[in-house]
Image (cartoon, rainbow, N blue to C red):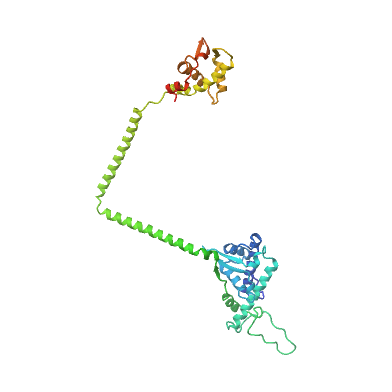
C-alpha cells in the first residue's frame, strides 16, 4: 500500500488499523479463491500473505486476533464469519462459519460488507470507551475532523463531549489508548484435538514411564559396575586377562581351520574334469538311446543300421529336448559303445571316417539299472 499521508483526516494509527484489516480481507480472499472456504486457514500462511499485501510491517498472530476480535465485538457480532481454533502443536487456524462454507470465496461485495462491519464495530467500541469515562473530554490540541456548520446567526453549536462516533472528534493520544485496549479474538481448542487429548495424555504417560524405566535400569547397571570394580584385580591383571583371551581366540580359530582341512582331506576327492564329463554323458544316455531308436525305425527293417558320425551328431542336436553340444553328443555315443550298451551300439573307424552301427538284435532291456551300476546317479 502507499505510505500513510500525514495530512489525512484520520490519525495515522487508525488509518494503519483500517489498512491492516483491508489487507487481511484481501489475503483471505486470495486464499479462498485458490482453496475454497471449506478448509481452515493456517495463520502462518495467512500472516505471510497479509504482510505481502500490506507492505507496512510484518503481520503477527495478534494482528489477526485484533481484526477478528473487533468484528466479534460490535453490534453485528453475530454476523462475524470468522473464529480461531487451536489444532495443537503450534498450529492455529482461522475457520469460517457454516454460512460461508457453501461459497467458493469472498466476493467483492462481502469484502466491502466486512469492511463496513469493522468500521461500525470501531465506532461502537469508541462510544463504549468514551461513555465508560476513559476519554470523557478532549485534551488540549485535539484535532477536529468534522466541524458542525453554523445554523443561522449566533454561535456555532457546541460539540457533544460523549463522542458516539469515532470519526467525529479524535486526537492522536486518545486513538493510541483506544487501539491499545481493543479486544482480541479468543483461540478455542479444536473439537478433534479435544477428542484425542486423552489418547495423547495416555501416550505421554507411557513415554514418561518408559523413560523412567530406562533411567532406572541405567542407574542399576552403573551401581553394579561400581560395586564390581571394588573386587576387580588391578589394571595390569585386567590387561593380562584380555591378552590371554585374545590368544585363546586365535588358537581356537587355527584349530577350526586345521580341522576343516583334515575333514576335506579325509573325505572323497573331487571328480576330475574327465570324470565329470563321463558322468554327464551317462546321465544323458537314455535320451540318446531314445533318439537312436527313432532313427533306426525310420531306416526301415533290418537288424543292423549304420549312421555316419557327423550325420548322427547333427540328428542328436536337432532331436534332444535339452540342447546338447557336438562334443557332449560324441561323448555320449562313446560311453554307450564302451560301457552302457557295448553290443547294441558300436563305433567303427576307418581312417578319418567314423560310423556308428546299431545292432537291434542286442537291444538292452535294463538300461536304468546299468546306469545306476556305473554311477550315473
Q: Can you give x and y, in whole percent of width and height, for residue 122 in the image?
A: 63, 76
| Whether residue 164 is situated above or below residue 185 in the rendered picture | below
Residue 296, placed above or below residue 131: above
Q: Is residue 2 visible?
A: no
Toward which corner of the image does residue 28 lie, by quadrant? bottom right
Q: Position of residue 51 (x, y in %)?
A: 60, 64
Front-lying residue, 250 or 174: 250
Q: In which quadrant will I find the C terminus? A: top left
Whether residue 194 is visible to the viewer of this picture, yes or no, is yes
Residue 245's place in the image compared with 60, above or below, is: above
> In this orientation, which residue lies closer to the viewer: 11 or 239?
239
Residue furthest right as drawn? 152
Q: How many labels does the image show?
A: 0
Residue found at x 70% / y 68%: 109
| Near-viewer residue (350 or 150) | 350
Residue 188: x %, y % from top left: 55, 69
With 148 as the anchor, is 331 left or right in this view? left
Q: In this view, does 199 lie to the left or right of 173?
A: left
Quadrant in which the N terminus is drawn: bottom right
| Residue 22 position within the rendered picture, expressed as x and y whole percent measured from the top left | 65, 68
The residue lying furthest to the top in this view is 350
Amino acid at each position: 500500500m502507499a505510505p500513510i499521508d500525514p495530512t489525512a483526516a484520520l490519525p495515522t494509527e487508525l488509518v494503519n488499523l483500517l489498512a491492516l484489516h483491508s489487507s487481511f480481507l484481501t489475503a483471505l480472499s486470495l486464499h479462498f479463491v485458490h482453496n475454497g472456504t471449506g478448509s481452515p486457514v493456517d495463520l502462518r500462511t495467512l500472516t505471510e500473505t497479509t504482510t505481502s499485501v500490506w507492505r507496512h510491517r510484518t503481520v503477527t498472530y495478534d494482528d489477526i486476533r485484533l481484526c477478528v476480535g473487533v468484528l466479534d465485538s460490535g453490534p453485528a457480532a453475530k454476523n462475524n464469519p470468522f473464529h480461531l481454533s487451536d489444532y495443537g502443536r503450534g498450529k492455529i487456524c482461522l475457520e469460517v462459519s457454516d454460512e460461508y462454507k457453501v461459497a467458493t470465496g469472498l466476493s467483492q461485495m462481502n469484502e466491502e460488507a466486512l469492511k463496513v462491519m469493522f468500521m461500525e464495530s470501531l465506532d461502537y467500541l469508541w462510544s463504549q470507551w468514551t461513555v465508560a469515562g476513559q476519554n470523557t473530554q478532549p485534551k488540549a490540541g485535539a484535532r477536529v475532523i468534522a466541524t458542525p456548520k453554523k445554523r443561522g446567526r449566533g454561535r456555532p453549536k457546541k460539540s457533544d463531549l460523549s463522542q458516539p462516533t469515532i470519526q467525529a472528534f479524535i486526537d492522536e493520544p486518545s486513538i493510541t489508548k483506544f487501539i491499545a485496549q481493543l479486544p482480541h479474538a479468543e483461540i478455542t481448542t479444536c473439537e478433534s484435538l479435544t477428542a484425542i487429548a486423552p489418547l495423547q495424555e495416555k501416550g505421554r504417560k507411557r513415554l514418561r514411564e518408559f523413560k523412567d524405566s530406562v533411567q532406572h535400569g541405567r542407574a542399576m547397571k552403573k551401581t553394579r559396575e561400581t560395586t564390581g570394580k571394588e573386587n576387580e584385580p588391578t589394571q595390569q591383571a585386567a590387561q593380562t586377562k584380555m591378552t590371554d583371551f585374545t590368544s585363546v581366540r586365535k588358537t581356537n580359530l587355527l584349530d577350526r581351520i586345521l580341522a576343516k582341512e583334515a575333514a576335506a582331506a579325509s573325505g572323497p576327492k573331487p571328480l576330475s574334469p574327465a570324470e565329470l564329463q563321463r558322468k554327464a554323458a551317462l546321465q544323458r544316455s537314455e535320451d540318446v538311446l531314445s533318439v537312436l531308436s527313432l532313427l533306426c525305425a525310420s531306416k526301415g527293417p533290418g537288424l543292423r543300421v549304420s549312421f555316419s558320425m557327423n550325420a548322427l551328431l547333427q540328428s542328436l542336436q536337432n532331436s534332444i529336448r535339452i540342447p546338447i553340444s557336438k562334443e557332449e553328443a560324441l561323448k555320449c555315443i562313446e560311453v554307450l559303445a564302451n560301457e552302457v550298451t557295448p553290443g547294441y551300439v558300436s563305433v567303427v573307424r576307418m581312417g578319418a571316417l567314423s560310423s556308428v552301427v546299431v545292432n537291434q538284435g542286442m537291444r538292452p532291456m535294463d538300461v536304468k539299472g546299468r546306469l545306476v551300476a556305473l554311477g550315473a546317479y
